[in-house]
Image (cartoon, helix red, strand yellow):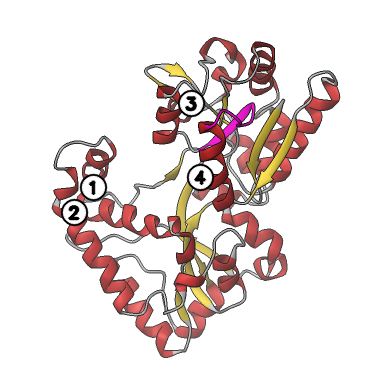
């Protein structure tokens, strides 16, 4: 059997979980390969389409999963995951369903997006945490005046740019505008919230919020986070998985109290709830329809019994990540990273 997953983030958790399964099931081992985000997305498209994908297919569910189901590339595992069904957060598990049947299951942490900030640079520039869009634009001016890059952005990877769009659309027009587009309703993209959001984003770009070199910054090597912990950039809008980058690549810097975080600001005149959060419910594994029936059954057994088990969940928490399972509040409270965990 085979599985593909991503490098970084909870990669070690995956390695430990597969190793535990392989030790207990020597006749049904997984061969696992790990890929950087962008290269994985390119490889998986052609591999699944040609029938040469892995037994366990890693994804973000959503539209991609619907395409897999429509093309009969993955199998229905609804009745094969009774243990995981009881453990997983229902709303997160639902994202892996198509027409009420489970075709993908969560495999790691919930992944909300937030703005990280460099407390040292904020103090140096005399900037308070922005609560509104005007506050953010004012902060940009102050950081630029000090020769500090206001916001790090991995523009070459493109997907980090979408975070700014989704949050701005929400803060301007509330969740309805975004949901209509997600549901592909006719005329959804004509909602005024989109035009206003793009105008706001252009305003930020023109103000120099991202500097003039963001198009060369890559997320796969965490270059955007590095700009923050090397004291070159003041802020970064990214997923909660980047917290592990800060705590591993810049542990002394974090331990010195330099890392902070806050929710995306409100937009004056907008109707969005400032507590609304965007991001990924989790990442997911599906079972390939091209695998043998025996391998399909073993893969489903792995997902039900080893995936997100107690050991894996504890490892995620120790990394500063919130597993996509129920009834772990006391473990979060006991964590050294509880401030971050409870915020996300």
Q: Is residue 265 visible?
A: yes
Crowd band around label 2 with a 10 angstrom C-alpha radius: few (<14), some (14–19), many (20+): many
Taking 310 as reference, is 11 above or below it? below
Residue drawn where x is 64% and y is 23% of the image: 303
Q: Quadrant of residue 50?
A: top right
Residue hosting label 2: 193
Q: What segment is highlighted magenta in the picture?
A: 50-59
How far apart are the two marked residues, 2 and 4, measured between alpha carbons? 25 Å
> Which numbered tag is attached to residue 174?
1
Q: Main secondary structure of the magenta part?
A: loop
Q: Residue at 60% of width from left, 69% of height from top?
A: 226
Q: Judge whether residue 270 can be spotted in this image.
A: no
Q: Secondary structure at mark 2?
A: helix
Seen in the picture, residue 99 relative to 30 is either above or below; the reply is above
Magenta span contains residue 52: yes
The residue lying toward the viewer, choosing from 61 and 10, is 61
């Amino acid at each position: 059997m085979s599985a593909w997953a991503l490098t970084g983030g909870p990669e070690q958790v995956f390695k430990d979980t597969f190793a535990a399964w392989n030790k207990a099931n020597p006749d049904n081992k997984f061969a696992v390969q790990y890929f950087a985000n962008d290269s994985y997305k390119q490889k998986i498209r052609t591999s699944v389409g040609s029938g040469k994908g892995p037994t366990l297919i890693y994804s973000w569910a959503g539209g991609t999963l619907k395409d897999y189901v429509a093309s009969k590339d993955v199998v229905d595992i609804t009745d094969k995951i009774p243990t995981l069904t009881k453990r997983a957060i229902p709303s997160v598990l639902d994202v892996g369903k198509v027409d009420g049947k489970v075709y993908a299951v969560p495999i790691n942490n919930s992944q909300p997006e937030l703005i990280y900030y460099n407390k040292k640079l904020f103090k140096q520039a005399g900037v308070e945490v922005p609560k509104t869009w005007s506050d953010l634009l004012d902060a940009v001016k102050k950081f630029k005046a000090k020769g500090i890059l206001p916001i790090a952005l991995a523009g070459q990877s493109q997907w980090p740019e979408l975070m700014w769009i989704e949050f701005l659309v929400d803060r301007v027009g509330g969740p309805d505008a975004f949901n209509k587009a997600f549901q592909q309703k006719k005329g959804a993209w004509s909602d005024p919230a989109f035009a206003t959001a793009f105008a706001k984003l252009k305003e930020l770009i023109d103000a120099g919020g991202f500097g003039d070199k963001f198009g060369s910054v890559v997320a796969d090597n965490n270059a955007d986070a590095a700009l923050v912990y090397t004291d070159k950039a003041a802020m970064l809008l990214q997923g909660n998985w980047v917290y592990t980058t800060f705590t591993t690549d810049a542990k002394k810097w974090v331990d010195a109290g330099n890392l902070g975080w806050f929710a995306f600001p409100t937009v004056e005149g907008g109707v969005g709830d400032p507590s609304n959060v965007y991001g990924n419910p989790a990442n997911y594994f599906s079972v390939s329809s091209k695998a043998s029936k025996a391998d399909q059954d073993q893969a489903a057994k792995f997902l039900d019994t080893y995936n997100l088990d107690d050991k894996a969940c504890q490892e995620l928490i120790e990394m500063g990540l919130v597993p996509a399972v129920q009834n772990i509040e006391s473990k979060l409270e006991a964590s050294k990273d509880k401030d971050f965990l409870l915020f996300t």
